[in-house]
Image (spheres, helix red, strand yellow):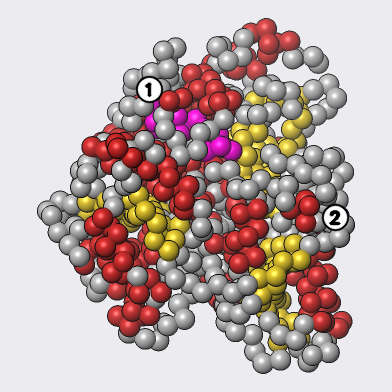
């Protein structure tokens, strides 16, 4: 993780960790909605299409696709890449051959379904016919009819396992490549091989930022006779000059700092909306609060404007997001306080001033806890430039960075792609299943750190997914590679048959995939309602209780409402569980059910044993691997319970402290018996110091 002098973190009391609460939703991709704002929605669909900037580049795009095998298309959010590029290919006959489709990958499931729906509408056909989609546990397309298929990156990787040359596609569009997810990098590495064998396959890479050269060069590297197979197409978008301003001395509290700059600008500048970049929902809310109080106090600025302060983050309801895109009413200046979502995911018109905290929240592999945690870190210079650019879309703009110039220039040039920052165990498993035996020699667009690779291999070995030759085990390793779940969770699920608790474990796994089962609220009433499901063992069995009660009540919405539970979340868990059952049946895992708590807990240990903590005599928990101090998260059932000597957790949340989420107490003997290779007898018992 970068750490530069001159960047003071806000209000730290233990020095390396950020002081702001990190919200769980960000860890899970699905909660981030990429909001779509359509300023031409009153026009007929065809006219809307023709108004998009990408339309002007249609001919150049098709020409370059003819000439090159790989075309990297760079264009701002909203210019029409995701919806139009596949249609351009379709209209010029790229998928006219029987059985060949145009595949478009998306990092987020919601994007895949909404884009498919929109494009089906533009083509005036029912979804699932010419245009379809395929996402984890849900698909709607036809093998005979579908010509454009939106799919998530994970699904494309799974398809590559069955169809290594992607014979059912004539073109692949990788969308949102600037996000550089692990999966995108794996796909790019694999596709580079596929393109050599399938000269007729076209690859379009779409990105919202200008780091396209790196990708182009990756595909051109090592070609026979240095023949270039990749090129770049930039879609016109006007950019005005943006003046950048820095601080003279480092800022101690960037949330407050950003608010102060905004109030000064508001008083000084005649016009122009303001966009503030912070790292998460809580920071945004606190900054909005600050500015609203100021605005109430100050009233109109001397230029006759009032402030209209608006938050913007993924978890906000669509209705509230929409407000951000509407022009401010007369006499008001819009101040949008946003997370990183406004860097590339959405574009807001009329922004003239950008205030950049220069921080971002990102997942990093933590070699101490052996898991990913979300950490607030400094942005890269490229991100800083991209954020500043948001001020110069309609007129010359200004950007205020909350750091000194010399510190900004010391920041890393680019944000490391996810593959260099996060847990690699699932990636390794998938590559192995794709026949890539020597992961170290695989041509990644950006090579992952060898230490992370080793940690990933060790974990997979301990889980029994690979053998001592490094090969996938049969059937366990192969089945784990097919499951779109973290390997620890897959192992737990696949062990449930032999442990006689398939139904219970599938239910728990489904519940763990869904966020916010319990209604928000700290009131005593909510707490009391929650307590009726709680069991002393911890969160896993509590989740199971909630689900069984929901089922018993006929999955009633009314019952959910009166018990502080979220119906939508539970319904989603129900659907997910159905999907898991389907997969388990395909793997011929026996369907069993039990009322014996112990076998359920043992089965949890069989997968999650690497995430174990013990109670140190000091009264604190420490991880068995790594001896890192961990705390039980306040949302856990075990938060206020009497302390049990050994715990297993599902997830780490790294905020002010390192928190364990979804926790259960276990018998240490199980660790020794169920994971003997991982916890030698001596090591665990030595820790029993009471
Ligand atoms: P890009 O991928 O370049 O960000 P898109 O192709 O997703 O752009 O969207 C182009 C435009 O199409 C948007 O600005 C919006 O006007 C319109 N659009 C896209 N999806 C939808 C949708 N689901 N509903 C309404 N309008 C949409
Ligand atoms: Mg897009």
Where does the C terminus fall, quadrant-wise? top right
Whole-percent x, y for residue 615 in the image: 76, 24
Seen from the viewer's position, the closer of residues 91 and 544 is: 91
Residue 493 sits in which quadrant? top left
Q: Which mark is residue 345?
A: none
Residue range in magenta is 419-432
Q: Disc 1 designates what residue?
A: 437
User: Badge 2: few (under 14), some or many (20 or more) residues near its Cα, within 10 Å?
Assistant: some
Whole-percent x, y for residue 54 in the image: 38, 71
Q: Main secondary structure of the magenta part?
A: helix
Whole-percent x, y for residue 53 in the image: 41, 74
Contact? badges 1 and 2 (CB < 8 Å): no
Q: Is residue 65 among what the camera can see?
A: yes
Could you tell which of marks 1 and 2 lies nearer the N-terminus? 2
Q: Is residue 509 left or right of residue 393?
A: left
Tell me what residue is drawn at x 37 percent, y 22 percent.
437
């Amino acid at each position: 993780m970068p750490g530069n002098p001159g960047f003071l973190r806000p209000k730290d009391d233990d020095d390396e960790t950020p002081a702001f609460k990190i919200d769980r939703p960000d860890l899970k991709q699905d909660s981030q909605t990429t909001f779509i704002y359509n300023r031409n929605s009153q026009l007929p669909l065809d006219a809307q299409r023709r108004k998009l900037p990408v339309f002007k580049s249609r001919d150049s795009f098709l020409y370059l696709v003819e000439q090159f095998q790989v075309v990297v298309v760079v264009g701002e959010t909203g210019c029409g890449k995701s919806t139009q590029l596949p249609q351009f290919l379709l209209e010029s006959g790229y998928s006219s051959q029987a059985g060949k489709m145009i595949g478009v990958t998306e990092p987020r499931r919601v994007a895949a379904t909404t884009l498919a729906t929109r494009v089906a509408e533009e083509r005036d056909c029912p979804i699932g016919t010419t245009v379809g989609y395929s996402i984890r546990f849900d698909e709607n397309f036809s093998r005979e009819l579908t010509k454009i298929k939106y799919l998530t990156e994970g699904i494309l990787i799974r398809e590559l396992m069955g169809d290594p040359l992607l014979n059912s596609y004539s073109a692949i569009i990788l969308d949102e490549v600037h996000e550089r997810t692990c999966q995108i990098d794996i796909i790019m590495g694999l596709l580079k091989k596929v393109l050599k064998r399938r000269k007729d396959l076209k690859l379009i890479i779409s990105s919202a930022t200008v780091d396209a050269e790196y990708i182009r060069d990756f595909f051109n590297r090592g070609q026979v006779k240095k023949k270039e197979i990749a090129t770049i197409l930039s879609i016109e978008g006007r950019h005005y000059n943006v003046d950048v301003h820095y601080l003279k001395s480092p800022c101690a509290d960037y949330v407050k700092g950003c608010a102060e700059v905004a109030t000064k600008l508001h008083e000084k500048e005649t016009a122009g909306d303001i966009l503030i970049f912070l790292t998460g929902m809580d920071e945004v809310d606190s900054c909005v609060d600050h500015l609203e109080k100021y605005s109430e106090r100050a009233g109109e600025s001397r230029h006759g404007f009032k402030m209209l302060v608006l938050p913007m983050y993924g978890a906000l309801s669509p209705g509230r997001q929409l407000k951000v895109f509407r022009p401010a009413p007369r006499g008001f200046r819009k101040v949008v306080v946003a997370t990183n979502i406004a860097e590339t995911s959405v574009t807001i018109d009329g922004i003239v001033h950008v205030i950049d905290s220069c921080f971002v929240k990102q997942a990093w592999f933590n070699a101490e806890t052996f898991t990913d945690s979300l950490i607030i870190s400094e942005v890269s210079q490229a991100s800083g430039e991209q954020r500043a650019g948001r001020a110069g879309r309609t007129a010359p703009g200004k950007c205020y960075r909350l750091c000194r110039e010399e510190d900004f220039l010391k920041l890393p040039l680019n944000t490391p792609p996810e593959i260099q920052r996060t847990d690699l165990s699932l990636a390794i498993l998938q590559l192995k299943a794709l026949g890539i035996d020597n992961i170290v020699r695989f041509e990644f667009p950006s090579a992952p750190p060898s230490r992370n690779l080793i940690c990933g291999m060790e974990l997979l070995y301990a889980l029994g997914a690979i053998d001592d030759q490094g090969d996938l085990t049969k059937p366990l390793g192969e089945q784990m590679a097919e499951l779109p779940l973290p390997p620890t969770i897959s192992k737990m699920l696949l062990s449930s048959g032999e442990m006689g608790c398939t139904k219970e474990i599938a239910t728990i796994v489904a519940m763990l995939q869904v966020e916010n089962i319990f209604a928000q609220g700290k009131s005593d009433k909510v707490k009391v309602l929650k307590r009726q499901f709680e069991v002393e063992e911890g969160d896993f069995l509590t989740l199971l209780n909630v689900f069984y009660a929901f089922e018993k009540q006929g999955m009633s919405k009314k019952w959910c409402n009166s018990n502080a539970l979220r119906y939508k979340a539970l319904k989603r868990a129900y659907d997910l569980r159905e999907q898991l059952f389907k997969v388990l049946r395909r793997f011929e895992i026996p369907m069993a059910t039990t009322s014996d708590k112990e076998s359920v807990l043992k089965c949890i240990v069989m997968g999650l044993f690497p995430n174990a903590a013990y109670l140190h005599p000091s009264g604190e928990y420490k991880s068995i691997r790594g001896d890192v101090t961990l705390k039980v998260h306040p949302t856990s059932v075990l938060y206020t319970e009497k302390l049990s000597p050994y715990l297993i957790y599902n997830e780490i949340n790294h905020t002010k402290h390192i928190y364990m989420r979804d926790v259960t107490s276990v018998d240490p003997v199980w660790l020794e018996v169920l994971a003997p290779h991982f916890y030698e007898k001596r090591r665990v018992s030595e820790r029993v110091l009471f």
